[in-house]
Image (tube, grey):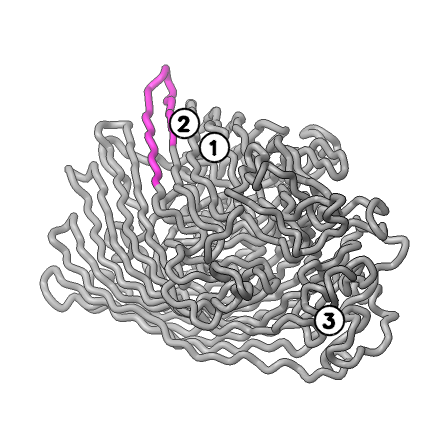
Amino acid sequence: MKGFFSIEVIHRLVNAVTLALCGTALLATGTVCAEDQQEPVARKDEIVEIVVTAQKRSENVQNVPITMQAYTGGQLQSAGIGEITDITKLAPNLNVVVQNSLSQHIVIRGVGTNEFFGNAPSSVGTYMDEVTMNSSYMSTLGLFDMERVEVLRGPQNSLFGRNTTGGAVNYITKMPKVGADKIDGSLVATYGRHNLAELEAGVSLPMGSTAALRLAGIYHQRDGIWHNLDTGDEHYGDEDRHSLRGTFVWEPSEATRLTASVHSARSNGDAQPQKMAGALAPISATNPVLRINDLAAFTGNIDWEHGILNTAGNAPTVNIENFDRLTTRWQDVWNGGSQRGDLQVDGGYVKLSHDFGVATLTSISSYDKTHGFYEEDNTGDGNIQGAGTPGVTHDVLVIDMDQEYKQFTQEFRLASNDNTARFRWITGLYYLDEKSTLAQDIRFGDNGFPGAHPSVNGAAPIGLLDVIPDPYGNTVSFSIHHLRDKSYSAYGQADYSFADKWNATVGVRVTRDDKADPWVYAGAFIKPTPWDPSIFIGESEILALSAGLSSCFPRGAIPYFVWCADTEAAGGTLPPRQNLKNTEVGGKLGLQYHVNDDVMLYGSYSRGFKSGKFDLEFLHTSDTPFPQRPLNPETLDAFELGFKSTLLNRTLVLNGAVFFNIWKDQQVFNVGVNGPEFFNLPESHIKGAEFEANWVPAESWLLSASLGLLDTELTDVTGIDFDVPVGTPGHGDFQKGHELPLSPKVSANAAVEKAFDVGSGKLTLHADLRYQSSSKVKFSPQVPIDEYTSRTELNARAAYAFGATGKYELALFGNNLTGEKYCLEIQDLRGVSGSFYCVPNDGEVRYGLQMRVGF
């Protein structure tokens, strides 16, 4: 990657620097600027009150009868939170599913989504300024110029809508200050290890007494930290992204407020690195041909950090192309193909609210367009040509995804104004219309898809493997879908103080989903010769390469993959797929008891759901031996008891909750003994507890601690536990009584912060620690990839603020000081490529220097 001070990089910085220059120019005209200080975590000797909008109205977080956390922009900066999914580092019972560098899903209390396909709705809703981020690709956007983040646990269907089975995360950006007579802004520059260079700026510009404009932006780059053995690239994994946002607020009267915001973001980095381990015994005199029947015997889990296989007799292993890709050095990876990981996001919203005295009417209209280009190499052979038998190419399993989403939403909300009234209410209507084009392909090398070989399926004796070709060998399987997702809902929630100290909450939402997949172009072609495996195959490339295919073969013909298949709408013969239509009802019943002004007890029952989805897996078509299985909606019934308290003269906040969830029809993607399949997992139970404490023992001190406990269990696997190998003891891919994946039994956070007066300035020292116990990878015991390892991460920051009201600040930070190495995602691809893979974390200490100027 280019150095920080190269001509190209400086040119890319112009967008962000311009924001700061707006303020500088006005300074030159004599305008007086206000200091935009980083808000303190503690004020004198008491806990700072944080106002949130978790219930669509402004309230003290301690008065909201929901288990939740709220973090200010300053707290996010101190903790080094730079991306949307980084929020999972701040609190217990939060996790993240990292499928690739563009598709990531937040997991709350064990409830999340485990697949990467473009139409996979998340089980945890994410929102930016109340606008849903429906595409999981938007989860990788950077966080900048933030007012706060709110994490709501448990179903939030009543007020936030569908796809909030596990909870919701609401990101709130900084708004311009109407009526101010001073420019308000800040500029933050960061430089760190591996040429980490980041510039963030935000400035509010007053526009008379009734309007204001805020411009904000961020530019981020970092050189890659990985050594790609496939290409020889010593700095693989470059990060390069920038975002801009403009927000205009107009208040023509005290009763009316108009907010208009536009944003644009670009990310142009390398694809997520992956570490590989073979699953097959190598070719030998007694084993001349590799096949899925030659699985190696593993005695324990793979030690990814040290490159130790734990096989019977410490025997080596290989993938289906007879390559050993396991490395002993953490930063060594194998990544071939085009290595593309690009994202483009453009959009905005208009929010209009008017106060009628008794109630306020709010309208929010939004539009977003997201386009992602991503490739991953699941065996590390994507750039090697001609070395095998028969020796065409070795892109054993390379996946390309070219996906575009266009999203429009409209919400009308009417809410009572008096928060002190005995009866408070809110009601609204919501509409979402998303159009998406999802082009994706999967390409195979010489040995194709070993789990689909004729011998494995009983079509030929194993001894004939040398002469019967794998039908998937040297092919590209593809699909292009034009999807339409429409969602309509009506909702309402009421709070009633029916007696002294007692309050009840009732909420309900009725949602109608209508999903269509009318245009499908799917099939496969044999790779042209010569073939360059480093070419990214997007929608246009698929259409060009498949243009010369003959008419579709008769259904079920062999070879499977020298055909095309498409719907009538796409010019083919297949009828359109039937729409997925569902009506779901979710909501909440809650009861609160206020012991006094500082202690509240609450209990609730809530129900949330995630909408159904089409099966778009690129191998699942009418001409392949894989089931095409659309998924039904999933539901979660949650029961919770909790308390919130502010004690010791407002110096101690102590909160806690216990919960029990019944999760039905969980949408699951699993690669098992039958290949890649989708399932609705009948039922699971989740129970647990959470406790958090924030204490200011003396002025300028802050101590924080939190603990999360989880106990998860698959309670019903009826209908999907059938894939036990015939005549062998054991279990299938789903086992009753097994734990849910990505659900560590124990997670904990702790932080300490202390401020000192040093000269005319203030030195603030901050340290935080996160612990997470091991958790399961799959839905049944799966040696050698049974568990994600436990991890402990320590971060620290020292900041010195000086100048008038602390307008200048210098900070030194270090993240992951323990140098923890662990897999963010582990997958079993034995039947597809004869390998396992691990998506690694950075695995090293990250440090740097930060400078902040307020004006």
User: Dividing the picture into quarters, in which one does residue 478 lie?
Assistant: bottom right
Left or right: 250 in relation to 574: left
Q: Is residue 101 magenta?
A: no
Q: Callout 1: 10 Å neighbours few (<14), some, many (20+)?
A: many
| The N terminus, quarter of image | top right
Q: Calculate the distance from the C-alpha at mark 1 to the C-alpha at mark 3.
A: 55 Å
Alpha carbon distance from label 2 to label 3: 60 Å
Residue at the limit of the structure toward the top, as seen here: 759
Task: Using residue 682 as the reference point, say whether residue 299 is left or right of it.
Answer: right
Q: Residues within 10 Å of mark 3 (few under 14, many from 20)?
A: many
Q: Which of pointers 2 and 3 indicates the residue nearer the eye?
A: 3
Q: Is residue 357 above or below residue 812?
A: below
Mark 1 vs 2, N-terminal side: 2
Give above or below for 543 relative to 271: below
Relative horizontal placement of residue 125, taking residue 276 as reference (left or right) = left
In this figure, which residue is indicated by the disc labeled 2?
806
Task: Return the x and y of residue 161 as percentages of the image width and height.
Answer: 42, 68
Q: What residue type is disc 3 on? A: Ala
**Residue 42 visible in this rendered orientation of the protein:** yes
650 and 318: which is toward the camera: 318
Q: Which mark, residue 231?
A: none
User: What residue does disc 3 label?
Assistant: 522
Numbered range of the magenta stretch: 748-768
Give the structural element (helix, strand or loop) at label 3.
strand
Residue at horizontal 76%, vertical 44%? 285
Farthest right residue? Answer: 530
In the rendered image, residue 123, in percent from the top left (x then y), is placed at 45, 61
Q: Residue at 82% across / 47% down in the picture? A: 388
Q: Which residue is disc 1 drawn over?
A: 854
Q: Secondary structure at mark 1?
A: strand
Give the number of callouts.
3
Q: Kindly identify the amino acid type of the residue bearing the numbered disc 1.
A: Gly
